[in-house]
Amino acid sequence: MKKLAIFVEGHTEQEFVERLLREVIGTRHLRIEVYDAIGGRRPGSRTLQFVHALDPTSDAKYLAMIVDCGSDSRVRSDIEERYAGLVAAGYSQIIGIRDVFPDVAFNQIAALRKGLHVGLKGAPIQVLFILGVMEIETWFLSEFTHFERIDAKLTPIVIQGALGFDPVSDDLQLRPNPAVDLHAAYQLVGRAYRKSKTQIQRTVEVIDYAHLYLGMPARLPDLDALNAALNQFLS
C-alpha cells in the first residue's frame, strides 16, 4: 500500500484536501484517515486524535493521512516531530499545506518557502510545502464556475461589477484577504462565507475539481505543484 501524509493548517484545508483526493483518486482503492493534532508546546507532547476514515476497507491500494494541525505555525513543527515515524511506517510522500495570510506579507513569501525547510530532514523524503497565496480561498475564487452553483445570479460579470476584481482572469494571489473576497461575493446573493463547517463544506462540494486539477496551473503554481505530487503518488 502506498502511503501519503498531508499536514494542513486548519479545517478548510482538511475538507478541501479530502474532497480533492476523492475526486482525483476515487474511493474504490483509497483509504483516507483524518486526524487532529492536539497537545501542548513541549517537543513530543502533541498527539493525533482520530476524527474519521473514508472507505476503511482491506483492499485499499492507497492510504492518505490528513492531519489538521490547527494553525499555520504548527504545520512545519508537526511534520518535523513525526518525520521519523512516518518514514519508519512506510510513507513515501509528506506534504504540508498552509496559508500565507495573516502572518506573512506578499513580499516575504520567498523567505517563508526557504525557511520552512531550514533544519528539516530532506532524505529519504523531501517534504513538499504548498502555500495558499494569500489563503487557500484564492483557489476557491479562481474556480470561478462554482459561483453560479452557489446561486445562478452570481456570475463573474456581477462579481467584477460589484467588487472590482475579475475571478476569470485576474491574478487572485494578489488579493490580500481572499476569504473576505469570497464572503463579499457570496453576500451579493445573500449567502455568507465565515469559515463555519457548514459553509466550508457547501463551497467544497460545489467546486469543479477537474477544472482546478487541469485548468489552473498557470494561475495557481502551488496548486499545480500539489496536483503534480498527487500524480506522482499515483504513479
Image: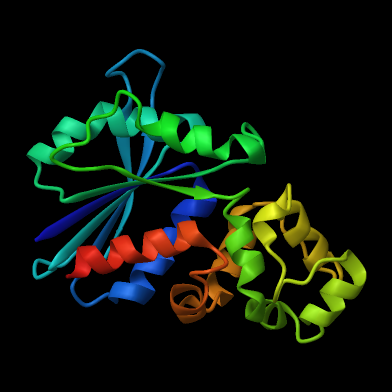
Residue at screen point 35% across, 26% down: 118
Residue at screen point 21% across, 63% down: 233
Which corner quadrant of the image does residue 8 belong to?
Answer: top left
In the image, residue 20 above or below residue 180? below
Residue 77 image point, x, y percent: 37, 27
In front here: 218 or 179?
218
The C terminus: image quadrant: bottom left
Residue 126 image point, x, y percent: 24, 43
Residue 62 image point, x, y percent: 17, 64
Specify the farthest residue to the bottom.
152
In the image, residue 231 above or below residue 131? below
**Left/right of residue 44 with respect to residue 204 in the rendered view:** left
In the image, residue 81 above or below residue 3? above
The N terminus: image quadrant: bottom left
**Left/right of residue 24 with respect to residue 235 in the rendered view:** right
Q: Say if residue 180 shows up in the picture.
A: yes
**Left/right of residue 166 with respect to residue 144 in the rendered view:** right
Q: Say if residue 55 shows up in the picture.
A: no
